[in-house]
Image (cartoon, rainbow, N blue to C red):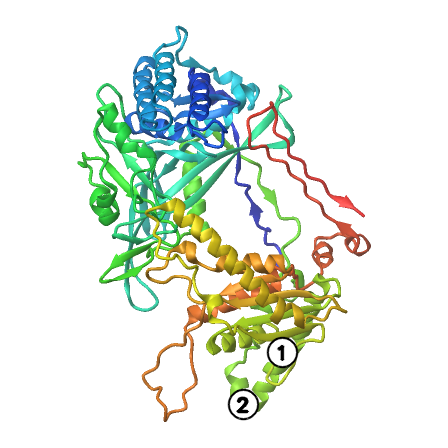
Amino acid sequence: MPKKDVQPPILLPARMNLAEDVLTDLEIAVLEFPFAEIVADFRNSMEEVLSPNRKKKVWIPYRQLNNGLLACASTLTHGFEYFDTGDYRALAVGTVENPLRVPTPEQIHELVMIWAQEWTKQFDGKGKTDQVNSVCDRFLENMAIIPSNWNWQPITPATLIQNINAEKGLGYQAIPSFLATLLHEQKCVIHSGQREQEIQWRKVQGDGSGRTGLFLVSQPFSALYTDDYGKEREGYFVYRLDFRVQTQAGRFNQNGKLQPWIFLHLSCQRYAHEPLIETNYARDISVLMGMNEERLSGYEVDSTLIRLTIENNGREDSDLWKFQLPNLLAAFKARPLETTQNILGNPANYSNLYNHPNWNRDEYYLVHAEGYKYEHENHKRGHSIKPGFSLQERGDIVAQVLELLNGVLIPDDPMQCDIPVPSGQKTPLAMRDYEYISQLPSFTIQQKEKLTEKEIKQRVDNRRQERQTIIADAIERALQGKPIHLFILWRERYTYDVTCQTLRDAFLLNEGEDFPEHIKVSSVWIDDPNLLKPLDTAGLTTKNSQEFDKHIRKQHQMKLDAWRDFLKQKVIASIDSTTKPYCFAIIEIGQTKKKGVHPKQSIYRVVREACVLEKIGSQMVQTVIPKSSAKEDESTDTSLSYSKKTEGRILSAVLDLTLRQVGTLYGLPSEVYEQAGIPKEIAQNLDVIALCRRKATQEGQDNIGRFADLKS
C-alpha cells in the first residue's frame, strides 16, 4: 500500500499515436506482380499433365523468388508477397534520409524470367515429355512479355492517413517499415548505473510486422560474466525492436475511419558464436545476411539485413539454403552465398560480432533459438545469455527511441493508479501462486534459539495443514464437486518415487497423511517394456523420406493400439464408474533424446493420442536418474538425491496436471473484483466476457475488435 502523501504510481501504456503530418515525408511505392494469373495457369496445366486425377500438387515457389530478389536488392521493403486473392505485390518505403532506391521493372523482370526458367527445369523427365515441354514453352512465352503499363506505383501518404485499411491494408506494413527506416543507422545512448552504452539501429527485412516488413536490431553486444557455479560465460545478443499497428473498436479519426495505435515491442535476439551441433527437429534455422557490396551488378544494396533460412528437416539433404536459393542466385549470375556448413561450423568467422568498422565482406548472423546446443570445450551447451531485460533498461531504450522519433510518435496519456494493487495479507488467494501456497514459515534467530526442533517441525506441519484445505477446495471448486482420479504410470522405481513424493508435496501432505477424499491417486506399473521403446524403423533411414514416413505412420498406429489396450486394462478398468471422476495421468515415457534415434520415433505423440482417445488428461515425464554419488556402495546406507533440474521438471509436470489442466485458482475471482471496489453483491454475480475478433487476412476494408463486460 502506498504511504500517505506518496503519489501512486503512473502507468504509461506502450501504445503511441502517429503524428499524421510526419507522413508527408514518407515515400511509398508498390509494384504489382502482373504474372500471377499466368503462373496460376501454368501450375494448373502442369498438375493436369503430371497427374490426370489431380492428386499431384504443384507448389508455386514465390518464397524462392522473393528471397532471391532480396538477396540481390536489400533496398526493397519486401518482395512479391500475397495481399489479396490471387494478387501479389512488392513494397518499398523511403524517407528523406533514406530515399527510395528500387530496381527498375525491367531489372526485376529479368530476374523473374530466370526464376520461371529455373522452375520449369524441375519438371524435366516427369510425365509425358511432349506435354510437359508444351506447357513449359507456353508458360515461358507468356512470362517473356512485359506489360506496357507495368511500373512502380506511388502511394500518397494522405491515403493511409485517411484510412489505415486503404490499398488492401497497406498501412499495416508500410507504417512499421516507415518507422524502422526512420531509425535506420540512427544512434542513441542508454544508461545503466555509471555505464553508458551506445546503440546503433539497423533494418532487418523479414518477419517484422506479421509475415513481411522491416524491424530493427542493434549492433551485436558481447556479455562476459561468471555464473552462479563459477563458470565463465560468453555470448552475443542484440536489442530487437518491432513496430506493430493495431486498431481499437470505436476509436475513429476525423474521417470516421479507424485510427491506429502504434506499439513498440522490445526483445532480446541472441546470436551464435560457437559451432551449432544440435538443432530443433523440423524447424528451419534463421540467418540474417548483410551485404557490404552489390551481389549482382546494377542492383543497389544498403546495410539492411535479410532473413534467410537453412533447411532443417532431418534428411540427408538438410543444412542447405532453403528453396534452392544458391541455384537461383547462380542462374542470376550473382555472387554466391557462403556455404551453410561453414556458417554452422564457425558462425563467429562469418559475422561481424566485434563491430569492426572496416568489415567489407558479407555478414551472416546465426540466430539462436531455444533448444540449440553448441560445441564448447569438447562438450555441448546452450546459449550463455538468458533473454529478457529489466524494466529500467527497457524503459530507457523506449524513451531514447521516442526521443529519436520526437514529433513522429506521441505516447498515449499516462494512466493514474486509482486503487493500489493488493499486497501482503490483503492479496486475494485467486492472485496467489503455488510458490506462495507452499512457502514455509520463517523463523528469526531468536525463535530458532528458543524453539526446539520438534516445535519448529510442528509449526511447519501446521502451516502445511492450513493450506492443504486451500488446495483441495480449489481443485474441487474447479471440477464443480466431481472427484478426480490421478494415475502415476511408471516403469522405473526412481521415476515413481520422485513423482509420488512431488505429487504429495504439491498437495502439502505431511508424512502419514492421505490425499483428500475427492482425490484418488493410483500407481500403475508399465509391465511391458516394449511400450516405452521408440517406434521401430526396420532399418529405413530418412534418405528415402516417403518410405520412412510411411513406415513410421504404420508403427505409430501399432504403438497407439498397444497403448490403448494397456490403458483400458490397467487404468480404465480401475476407475469407479459410479462416480465418473475426471481422470489424469502422469506417464513415464523413457528418455526422449537418444543417439541414433530419430525424433519421429518418439512415443510422445502416441501416448498423448492414446490418452485423448481414452478421455484421460496426460502429462509425460522422462525417466528419472538419480545423481551419482562416490559415497554410494552396498555397505553404506546413503539416501538418493536428484538434480535440481530433475526435481524442477517433475514439479512442473505435476503442477501442469493439477493446476493448469484442471483450471485451478486458489481463491474465488469475486474476491479480486471486491478488492477493485465492486460491491460484494455484484462481485459475486459478475461474469466478465471479453470478445475480440482480429482479422488476419486483407479481405474487406475494416478490422473489427469488440470487448464487452456483462453482468448476470
Give the residue type at disc 1.
Arg
**CB atoms at circles 2 and 1 under 8 Å apart?**
no
> In the image, residue 226 lies at what x, y percent?
30, 63
Residue 689 visible, this angle: yes
State which quadrant residue 336 falls in. top left
Q: In this view of the protein, which residue sits in the foreground, 268 or 449? A: 268
**48 left or right of 107?**
right
Position of the N terminus by quadrant: bottom right
Give the residue type at disc 2.
Glu
Which residue does the image show at 25% across and 52% down from the upper left? 275
Q: In this view of the protein, which residue sits in the foreground, 632 or 496? A: 496
> In the image, residue 289 lies at what x, y percent?
29, 36
State which quadrant residue 383 falls in. bottom left
Residue 283 visible, this angle: no
Q: How many marks?
A: 2
Which residue does the image show at 62% across and 48% down from the upper left? 417
Q: Which residue is mark 2?
A: 453
> In the image, residue 628 lies at what x, y percent?
35, 78
**571 left or right of 92?**
right
Disc 2 is placed on an element classified as helix
Q: In this view of the protein, which residue sits in the foreground, 110 or 272? A: 110
Classify 10 Å Cα crowding around label 2: few (below 14), some (14-19), many (20 and above). few
Q: Which residue is mark 1?
A: 463
Which mark is drawn over residue 69? Answer: none
Classify 10 Å Cα crowding around label 1: few (below 14), some (14-19), many (20 and above). some
Q: In this view of the protein, which residue sits in the foreground, 319 or 665? A: 319
Find the distance from the CA under tag 2 to the CA under tag 1.
Answer: 15 Å
**621 left or right of 343?**
right
State which quadrant residue 234 falls in. bottom left
- In the rendered structure, which disc, 2 or 1, sits on the residue that comes first in sequence? 2
Quick check: 408 above or below 217? above
